[in-house]
């Protein structure tokens, strides 16, 4: 008993019968009764995300879930675009996989800064890459390079990123709502 059972090493409990690692006194098994019970309020059967009067509630709930399961950089990018995918105008919060897109590709001189990144759904990202190659003149983006040269704008500058975003508005995505 003296070898395996000791008092609480953290001092949270007065219990003298905690299973303890004999080699390291700080390794103890916690008791389930120490974990506080958190009750979750169930959604009433008549409420649904389609109800316009409850829209704000479901948006807040989804944002909390998104923040809980994503790293800080993705949360910042989602906040920057107000949690809306630029390509399909749908919420980024949900079950679909998200992909970080470079607004100005590195091939054109894009930098690894937050202003140059955006979040897109995986399907929207794939469409975007296809359309970027189609409108940009292939893998080398010759048309885009020529476009920036004519405007005399550096692609990686703020003006270049803003101009590129404006050009993205002319892309014809299949996922856009009509």
Image: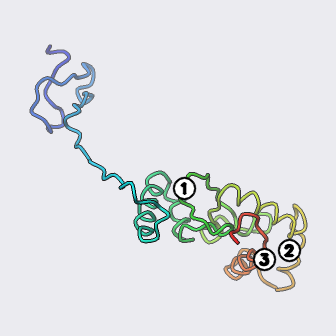
Q: Earlier in the sequence, mark 1 or mark 2?
A: 1
Q: How is the image coloured?
A: rainbow
Horizontal arrangement in the rendering, residue 117 relative to residue 44 (left or right):
right
Q: Quadrant of the C terminus?
A: bottom right
> Badge 2 local density, few (<14 within 10 Å), some, or many (20+)?
some
- Number of marks drawn: 3
Image vertical order of residue 87 relative to residue 122, above or below: below
The residues bearing labels 1 and 3 have C-alpha atoms spaced at a distance of 26 Å
Q: Which residue is label 2 attached to? A: 145
Q: Which residue is label 3 attached to? A: 170
Q: Secondary structure at mark 3?
A: loop
In percent of the image, x 87 and y 65: which residue is there?
A: 134
Question: Looking at the rendering, which quadrant does residue 45 occupy?
Answer: bottom left
Q: Which residue is label 1 attached to? A: 94
Q: Secondary structure at mark 1?
A: loop
Q: Whole-percent x and y of residue 155?
A: 76, 76
Horizontal arrangement in the rendering, residue 130 relative to residue 160 (left or right):
right
Q: Quadrant of the N terminus?
A: top left
Image vertical order of residue 160 relative to residue 48, above or below: below
The residues bearing labels 3 and 2 have C-alpha atoms spaced at a distance of 17 Å
In percent of the image, x 61 and y 52: which residue is there?
A: 97
Horizontal arrangement in the rendering, residue 55 relative to residue 3 (left or right):
right
Say if mark 3 contacts mark 2, CB within 8 Å: no
Q: Secondary structure at mark 2?
A: helix
> Badge 1 local density, few (<14 within 10 Å), some, or many (20+)?
few
Say if mark 1 contacts mark 2, CB within 8 Å: no
The residues bearing labels 1 and 2 have C-alpha atoms spaced at a distance of 36 Å
Q: Whole-percent x and y of residue 27?
A: 27, 28
In percent of the image, x 90 and y 68: which residue is there?
A: 137
Residue with the most extreme front position: 46
Q: Earlier in the sequence, mark 1 or mark 3?
A: 1
């Amino acid at each position: 008993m003296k070898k395996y059972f000791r008092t609480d090493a953290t001092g949270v409990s007065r219990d003298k019968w905690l299973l303890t690692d004999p080699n390291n006194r700080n390794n103890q098994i916690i008791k389930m009764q120490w974990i506080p019970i958190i009750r979750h309020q169930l959604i009433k059967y008549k409420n649904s995300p389609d109800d316009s009067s409850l829209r704000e509630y479901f948006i807040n709930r989804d944002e909390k879930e998104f923040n809980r399961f994503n790293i800080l950089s993705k949360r910042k990018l989602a906040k920057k675009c107000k949690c809306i995918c630029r390509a399909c105008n749908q919420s980024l919060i949900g079950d679909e996989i998200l992909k970080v897109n470079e607004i100005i590709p590195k091939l054109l001189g894009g930098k690894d800064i937050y202003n140059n990144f955006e979040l897109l759904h995986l399907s929207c990202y794939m469409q975007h890459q296809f359309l970027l190659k189609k409108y940009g003149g292939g893998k080398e983006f010759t048309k885009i390079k020529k476009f920036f040269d004519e405007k005399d704008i550096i692609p990686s500058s703020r003006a270049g990123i803003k101009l590129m975003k404006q050009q993205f508005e002319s892309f014809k995505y299949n996922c856009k709502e009509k």
